[in-house]
Image (cartoon, rainbow, N blue to C red):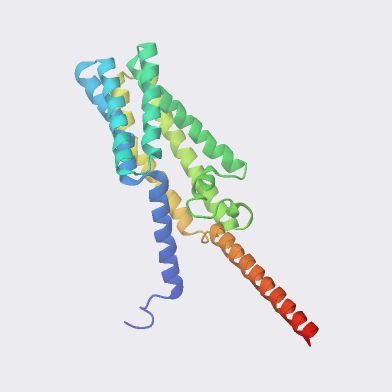
Amino acid sequence: MTSLDKPTTEDTSADDARAVTEAALFEAFGGVRGMVETVLPGLLFVSIYTINKNLHMSAIAALAVALVMVVVRLVRKDTVKHAFSGVFGVAFGVVFAMMTGNAKDFYLPGMLYTVGLALAYIVTSMAGVPLIGLMLGPVFRENLSWRTRNPGRKKAYTKASWAWGLILLAKSAILFPLYWWADTTQLGWVLVALKIPPFLLAVYLTWVFLAKAPPPIDVFAEMEAEEREAEERKAAAAQDDGGATTAGRHRRES
């Protein structure tokens, strides 16, 4: 291997930054398991409803599988935030559909949530506090330091939030006409098909923007360093005071 072929320190640090970004995104958005937990209840609902057109059986099955996934996470002592969000989403859909008697309303709360989330991404980006930054800041141990101390990362978070907002709005632009014009099974299958691809596209664009951004400022490490320095100064001051007291005692004795 020639010197030109050897990886430089900059290349290594860039690879490390990309690896950290990938791991953080995987953690923040739930990874493969989180995607399965997002898709499975809706897939089960539309599958059962397609076969027997029974709203109650379809809704109960979807809610039951969502609860089972939460129990499995609790038993394994895994994080339950993604599973719990799925349960709440399914529960709202079940209640709404049962109240109206319209099976399509099982999907309406989730569709409204998608629109609201899209607007939140866009509005927070315009306000200078992009939602992706608020979500990922603690994951990267940088909290809100990117707002004032790391303009490159703020720019990346803004781009990523715009990407999420526009992708979710495009998804909603497809689903809402189907809610009014298509039947329950058509809407359900299209919604299931659109669960993962837009999500993966948004996550990929987020990774691209952050991989090119400056590394995060680890504010937790800074706080720990400040605490260590304060303890060292305190110990040094106590040692100096002890030395001065001993010297004074020796002078008095002499």
- Near-viewer residue (97 or 204): 97
Any part of residue 204 in sight: no
Quarter holding residue 92: top left
Quarter holding residue 148: bottom right
- Near-viewer residue (149 or 125): 149
- Residue 67 to residue 223: above or below: above
Q: Position of residue 168 (x, y in %)?
A: 44, 36
Residue at 47%, 54% in the rendered image: 209
- Residue 165 to residue 15: above or below: above
- Residue 226 to residue 177: above or below: below
- Near-viewer residue (130 or 122): 130
In which quadrant of the rendered image does the C terminus lie?
A: bottom right
Q: Position of residue 225 (x, y in %)?
A: 58, 65
Q: Residue reaching furthest left?
A: 51
Residue at 52%, 39% in the rendered image: 121
Any part of residue 145 in sight: yes
Q: Residue reaching furthest bottom?
A: 254
Q: Position of residue 1 (x, y in %)?
A: 31, 82
Left/right placement of residue 55 relative to residue 111 reads left
Residue at 41%, 39% in the rendered image: 81
Quarter holding residue 149: bottom right
Q: Position of residue 165 (x, y in %)?
A: 49, 39
Left/right placement of residue 58 relative to residue 133 reads left
- Near-viewer residue (31 or 190): 31
